[in-house]
Image (cartoon, coloured by chain):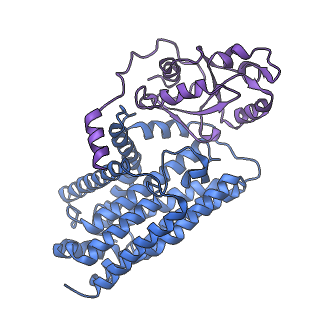
Chain colours: A blue, B purple
Amino acid sequence: MTALGVLGGALQAVLVVVGSPLLVGLMRQVRARMEGRAGAGVGQPWRDLRKLLGKQPITPRGTSELFRVAPVLLVAMTLVVAVVAPFVSTASALPPVADLIVVVALLAHGTVVLALAGLDTGTAFGGMGASRETTILALVEPTALMAIFALSVPVGSTALPAIVGSGLQDPARVLSPASLLAAVALLLVVVAETGRLPVDNPSTHLELTMVHEAMVLEYAGPDLALVELGSAMRLSVYLGLLANLFLPWGIATEAGVLALALGVLALVVKVAVLGAALAFAEVFLAKVRLFRVPELLAGSFLLALLAVTAAYFPA
Amino acid sequence: MLKLWRTIRRIGRVAEPAPPAPAELRPALAPRPAGSIQVRHVDAGSCNGCEVEIGSAFGPVYDAERYGARLVASPRHADALLVTGPVTRNMAEPLRRTHDAVPEPGLVVAVGDCARNCGVFAQAYGVVGAVGDVVPVDLEVPGCPPRPEVIVEALRTLTGR
């Protein structure tokens, strides 16, 4: 544990919590402008959250403790990743936790508790959403691990700070075939895991096509606020990982005000540009049929597998 | 895809300029702090004329979302119910249950003349009554069907934007 790690970790936590609803707002605004709308403004998700936090919490009849703790667990596990993973600085507040397997497992667990909470409500849509989400999760996790493995092979370590640090020292590696293949595979993972088009449509209200939203239909008030904040945080954590694994420049390597400020600025710019690009691309996409999603994810797994194979042949 | 991009570039912004904010006072029960409202639409037996107008109120031209209103998929997520049509016998109980599922204070907006006073369906054999006879109504939107501007104005009264 170093001063840089602790400082960076605290900064990252604040940045992810405050910034992720703004990221969602930015993405909605980009889509609104592309659709010819005026848009509600970047701050709208925060206005929604602020209102939801002041509302009456509802516990549906027949639900257990799991339903109540799931939103807290989702936010907590995402927050741990936000603190330890290398977003602002290459040093980690808790180096053993900043391991790629731990980080992927923590993010997957967020989905799992939400799926369990969806089952807990006992409603038809809760169970349907949970089954769909776990199907996608089961197909996505191997790809996520494989894609990051491809990056860890040349470094010889599964620690995320080491992978990001080596990318800084050896910029040519970013353009290697292994890295490019892994980037495409990981991008598909991010799209599937955060419920964006073409896997899930975040603005749909048609129950039969929902994946993520079907699980959380029974949440109200502060619980719903936590679920929405958690989902937004997952999106920014995934985009932040994607940005720093493949474009690590700007990240702070020493504890200084200037270095940390540059790290924060670089992260904000990278995640905002990635998010805006994702929202821009979504306007041109239609949701694929649910039964076609495994084919899409199998394709991304193949790319990840090729990336790992290519990583063993140094250019 | 290139064709779609050209269309987007050619058409640009279709949202009409925002009219001045409505002068009506916000209902005391409207969610605080202001600036955001989630609505759940309930069709209690409407002819679908009002649905078409609600659809265009949330479409690109009138863009009700820019004032912080959003249609949601579950009454649990909602602050207000947008109820259309006279309440038919089969929809009276579902409407009551939906109103119970909305967190306190669940506002009800009666959209269209049928929802306000049964309109042309008054005294029909399948109709229980107006929305106000089944659940308490906080705001009424007149018209058969109401114009999207009027629906947007009612939503703005609730969001306060």
Could you say which quadrant of the image residue A165 lies in?
bottom left
Residue at x 60%, y 36% (from the top left corner): B78
Q: Quadrant of the N terminus of chain A?
A: bottom left
Residue situated in front as seen by the camera: B28 or B43: B43
Could you say which quadrant of the image residue B92 lies in?
top right
Could you say which quadrant of the image residue A211 lies in?
bottom right
Left or right relative to B136: residue A101: left
In the image, residue B141 sits, relative to residue A118, either above or below, namely above
Q: Is residue A36 visible?
A: yes
In this rendering, the count of numbered labels is 0
Residue situated in front as seen by the camera: B66 or A247: B66
Q: Quadrant of the C terminus of chain A?
A: bottom left
Residue situated in front as seen by the camera: A27 or B62: B62
Image coordinates for residue B1, horizontal then vertical, percent: 31, 50
Please identify the residue farthest to the right as the structure is shown. Answer: B125
Image coordinates for residue A312, horizontal then vertical, percent: 29, 87
Image coordinates for residue B20, horizontal then vertical, percent: 39, 15
Please identify the residue farthest to the front as the structure is shown. Answer: B3
Q: Is residue A4 visible?
A: no
In the image, residue A67 sits, relative to residue A310, either above or below, namely above
Please identify the residue farthest to the bottom as the structure is shown. Answer: A313
Residue at x 22%, y 86% (from the top left corner): A314
Left or right relative to A268: residue B25: right
In the image, residue A308 sits, relative to residue A233, either above or below, namely below
Image coordinates for residue A25, horizontal then vertical, percent: 39, 42
Please identify the residue farthest to the top as the structure is shown. Answer: B23
